[in-house]
Amino acid sequence: MKRLLIALLAIGALCSDVVSSSSQRMVREGWFETRVDHFNPRNQDTFAMRYYMNDEFAYGRGPMFIVVGAAGPIQTRWITEGLFYDTAYLEGAYLFTNELRYFGYSLPVEDATTENMDFLNADQALADLAEWITYLKENVVRNPSAKVILMGTAYGGALATWFRQKYPHLANGVWVSSGAIQADFAFAGYNEALGESIRQYGSDACYSTIWSGFRVAQNMATLGLAELLSTEFHLCEPLDTENELDVRAFLLGLRDNIEFEMLHLRNTNAIREMCAELEEERDSSLNALIDWFAREHQYEQCVDMNFDSYMAPYLETNFNAASLQAGHRQRLYLQCTEEGFFPTTESEEQPFGNLIDRSFFAAVCQRAFGEWLTEEVIERQLRSTNARFGGLNPAIERGHFTNGGVDPYRVGSPLEDLNEKTPATLIPGTFVSPDLDSIDYEYDSEELIAAKERTRTLIDTWIFEDFEPIQQHV
């Protein structure tokens, strides 16, 4: 339940359509008819993809700024405020954003049963973008030569990167903020990054408490001491220590709680405060975890942390269900078939035990979509993603990759310049996508201001680099 609440809160924040009265008049909804399957000429079925546009600052013939839809319902925030919006004002740009197929109301199929998920992949989404951008150039901006700048975060950042690589004639530059672009099944680097942040902003003692507490908890589980764990962690259903998936789901749930506490406020003080609680004197590291966990869930009668409760948000197939509106099943399908990014503990450089391995997440994929999704199939799919798009080394120019120094997903994004025209900027002390908001010269750090100014300058360069002034004939 806590994971579902976290996702809904995050999406709610992103999807806020509260905008200023001046820009609200300019934001309009549109629908673009696009193919369900761009690569099968025998299938001419179409569906309507939702998008929004804001022409508040637009000159008559462009440029076009596009926020690429990510794995969630459409949100208009960044075409009504923030750095991209501010830069559009300076450049006289149209602002657009699209809704990714299978999310929100952009539905190419009737339901999300496994057999209907075949058209949810990057290649189809990129083809949607290509046809939509072409349509916008010809019918909205009415300038086939209009410059196009893409911005994307998370999965939208990966799509923006891959679009610039695959369709360079349709995008003149791309800004990717916290976009993980390298597919990785056993994404142990994510938990390693969490561990680094615990050491840096908490303490070595805090890291050791979590490390030891998890080892004790998993040892108790493997020894069959279910009653004590079930009682102390106030589990709704007794932990079945004979069921490996239940044991691993319990440990993953505990890890998820620590991750949430570290990241949800986007402030390093949250890590310090969590560690201060964990470091209070106890007779054991496990009791430190138990007491902290009890405070986190003090308003709940019990906590669901078995495999069935973990899987519940992923099994619904009705697009009207809250879990699909939030995008849980769709995002899992992308993970199982294209991205990975499963937070395994297959590394000694992280504090969350060592039982949450790739076999657990393969079981998750199989429970949700069928036995065909074996570890081998998942590995093959992820290799294909990296082979097609280059992993951490995409062949693109005119890009800017920005990442927060405390964002654990940074390990899946370029942290060093790809080439002279595609720099990367790591912003210390910041979390996911710290540079989307407008420049705040009073409260932003020097590094954050510099990153935002760099993005703004690069976008201006991408727009005018190939500009040919009108020649006057004498």
Image (spheres, rainbow, N blue to C red):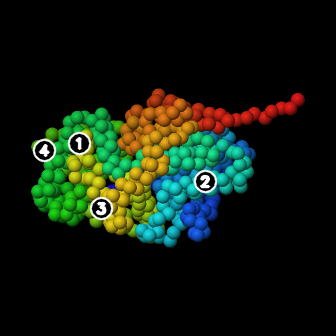
- Residue type at mark 3? Ala
**Residue 348 - label:** 1
Q: Please name the residue that numbered disc 3 is placed on.
A: 363
The picture places residue 70, in percent across and down from the top left corner, at 49, 53
Neighbour class for label 1 at 10 Å: few (<14), some, many (≥20)?
Answer: few
Residue sitting nearer the eye, 336 or 245? 336
Q: Do the residues labelled 4 and 1 touch (CB within 8 Å)?
A: no
Q: Which residue corresponds to the image point at 14% horizontal and 56% vertical from the top-left?
A: 222
Q: Please name the residue that numbered disc 4 is placed on.
A: 284
- Residue type at mark 1? Glu
Q: Nearer the viewer, mark 3 or mark 4?
A: 3
- For the N terminus, the image quarter is bottom left
Visible residue check, residue 7: no
Q: Which residue corresponds to the image point at 71% horizontal and 55% vertical from the top-left?
A: 139
Q: Which of marks 4 and 1 is in front?
A: 1
Q: Do the residues labelled 3 and 2 touch (CB within 8 Å)?
A: no
Name the element at disc 1: loop
**Residue 61 - label:** none
Residue sitting nearer the eye, 62 or 467? 467
Determine whether 97 is above or below 371 in the image.
Answer: above
**Res. 457 image quadrant:** top right
Distance of label 1 from label 3 (alpha carbons): 23 Å
Q: Which residue corresponds to the image point at 14% horizontal and 60% vertical from the top-left?
A: 226
Q: Nearer the viewer, mark 2 or mark 4?
A: 2
- Residue type at mark 2? Ala
Name the element at disc 2: helix
